[in-house]
Amino acid sequence: MEVSARFRDQRLAERLAKKIRALEPREPVRICHVCGTHEWTISHYGIRSLLPDSVEVVAGPGCPVCITPASLIDAAVELALSGVVVATYGDMFRAPGARAPSLYQARAEGADVRVVYSITDAVKMAREEKDREFVFFAIGFETTAPLTAVEVLRRPPDNLSFLVAHRLIPPAMEALANMEDLAIGGFIAPGHVSTIIGAEPYAIFPERYNMPVVIAGFEPLDVLMAIYMLLKQIKDGVAKLENEYTRAVRWRGNERAKEFMRKAFDIADGAWRGLGVIPSSALELKEGLRKHDAIERYGLNVSLDGQGDIPPGCRCHEIMVGRAYPTDCPLFLRACRPNRPIGPCMVSVEGTCRIWALEGGWFKG
Ligand code: SF4
């Protein structure tokens, strides 16, 4: 049997759900994950419907497109409209800016915007079209940042620069842990990111915040097991870092990928769309690589003030920290729908609003 099929076994899921219900806490417990793929699994498989009433699972800022500041999208659109070729991943294409429209609309106005599957495609295009200027809009967490680092360190062509919007997950989790009103009882840490950074960076949560953390894979049994492990810790009155995703995540992660990131980037404070500036949560090109930094090369003025991050009436900034559900937004599935999104959470396949719209994430038994 394939690994993925084993981790979708219905009988095992039912047994695990029974064990979870047996751990039903007396006080409400809020578990937070920080990964669009986890939200998809939870919504698609109706995992919320299997949980006791006192257990809530909310989505944190785990969608890279959703958290990319509108000011950076504005900068990408400005470049595209000025004649630079802008290449980026598919979901970023439709994300709205603050002053400017999306890259999709810029293309409709004649700009050369190209959707690529990987950064390698952008490098290849720049090498083949030496008479054009290219910018790769590099978004994503620790999963995509090493790919950017590799290409930056490999001496990219002179006509290619990078608009770097990479963000780091543990500092965002720490920002959430510090928001006392959220009352997070435990984190499900993202499997993909953890294959790169390892388990080690999450040790601060039990140590500093007395908060349980379980690193989880993406199949329904992974997520159920992580919820079980978190509730067991809570019942036992302990806070530990545990790894459910042992088939992919090691304590120190992928040393090579981390080395590439260390060589290419410095860590800086970074703006997250709708959430403000989170200390030490962004990557920026190292001094010696700045000639490939699009902001410096084109003298772009990118503000960190978050102005225009959230369109009027949109509640993405609350949804991305678990303060609200998509169904709390009056525009959800009315004015804002997957085919005509208003806010960033409805644009991306990893956005909570889009996932709920397509998978019915609100279903609770
Ligand atoms: S439904 Fe649309 S407008 Fe409402 S919070 Fe989600 S993305 Fe924003």
Image (tube, rainbow, N blue to C red):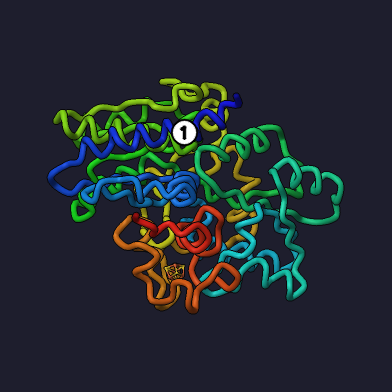
Question: Is residue 267 toward the left or the right of residue 140 in the image?
Answer: left
- List x then y, in percent, for residue 352: 45, 57
Q: Residue at x 49, y 33 (%)?
A: 9
- List x then y, in percent, for residue 166: 52, 46
Of residues 326 and 101, which is closer to you in this image?
326
Reply above or below: 16 against 174. above
Of residues 197 and 294, which is closer to you in this image?
197
Q: Is residue 181 visible?
A: yes
Q: In terms of secondary structure, where does tag 1 sit?
A: loop
Reply above or below: 244 against 344. above
Q: Amino acid at mark 1?
A: Gly
- List x then y, in percent, for residue 313: 40, 77
Q: Is mark 1 within 8 Å of ligand 1?
A: no
Please state the quadrant of the image where ligand 1 appears. Answer: bottom left
Q: Residue at the front extreme?
A: 11
Question: Is the C terminus in the top left, top right, bottom left or bottom right quadrant?
Answer: bottom left
Classify residue 111 by image quadrant: bottom right
Of residues 89 and 214, which is closer to you in this image?
214
Question: Is residue 172 toward the left or the right of residue 95 in the image?
Answer: left
Question: Is the N terminus in the top left, top right, bottom left or bottom right quadrant?
Answer: top right
Q: On the image, numbered disc 1 is attached to which residue?
A: 217
- List x then y, in percent, for residue 155: 71, 35
Q: How many marks?
A: 1
Q: Residue at x 50, y 35 (%)?
A: 8
Q: Residue at x 60, y 26 (%)?
A: 2
Reply above or below: 232 against 42. above
